[in-house]
Amino acid sequence: MPSTLLAPCQYREEIRKSRFLALAAPVASAAEAQAFIETHGDRSASHNCWAWKVGNQYRFNDDGEPGGTAGRPILTAIEGQDCDQVVVLVIRWYGGIQLGTGGLARAYGGSAAKCLQAGERRELVLRQPFTCHLQFAELAPFKARLNEFDSRLESEDYDANGAHLQLAVVATERERLERLLADISRGRAQLQAL
């Protein structure tokens, strides 16, 4: 199951006189990932190479290193560690010794992997969006038990008869949650996929 970092982490390494600093952090969006890169990049360094992955979206950048030797290995490290919703920035200060394309790929990918391995992680629980309508008398008992199903109330929109609830439901808990909903509403309310 994919995981993300609980907090930012870093890893330092020196390879043939070049210094590498890998910085990784959890992110919720592409904009957050780019903001992290802008904030933590070091303009005095030789290269600021990075990759991020948020769901099906991903980007990477070699920042002047030969094509495919930095950004892609960092992304491969993210995927190899089964991470999602993370950004990794690897900063290199050139030490005067050429590493070659294979050496660069190993250095960038290895630093990223070691950084992610050192970070504290949590599993990502995938939730699906659903909606339902409950009458006023049914709202309190339903909301009181929602946490038992590891599901979240995203929004509620009231009308004259009750409220339309938008829920984020863990797939494995859907059937149990549907039974609760049927019990509380006496079979009137049902989950509807969005």
Image (cartoon, grey):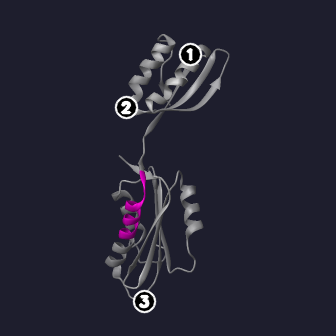
Check disc 2 and report the residue beneath it. Answer: 172
Q: Where is residue 176 in the image (x, y as percent from the top left)?
A: 40, 23
Which mark, by number, is residue 130? none
Where's residue 92, x and y in %? 46, 77
Q: Could you tell me the amino acid type at mark 1? A: Glu
Q: Does the magenta stretch include residue 120?
A: yes
Closer to the camera, 159 or 4?
A: 4
Q: Is the magenta stretch mostly helix, strand or loop?
A: helix
Q: Earlier in the sequence, mark 3 or mark 1?
A: 3
Q: Classify mark 3: helix, strand or loop.
A: loop
For the question of whether residue 22 can be seen, the reply is: yes
Give the farthest residue toward the top. 186
Marks 3/1 in contact by CB < 8 Å: the verdict is no
Q: Is mark 1 on a helix, strand or loop?
A: helix
- In the image, residue 96 lies at what x, y percent? 42, 89
| Residue identified by numbered label 3 | 96
Would residue 33 be found to the left or right of residue 11 on screen?
right
Q: In which quarter of the image is residue 118?
A: bottom left
Q: Which residue position is annotated with label 1?
A: 138
How many angstroms separate mark 3 from mark 1 (CA)? 70 Å
Mark pair 1, 2: CA separation: 23 Å
Whether tag 3 and tag 2 are in contact, CB under 8 A, the answer is no
Foreground pick, 130 / 137: 137
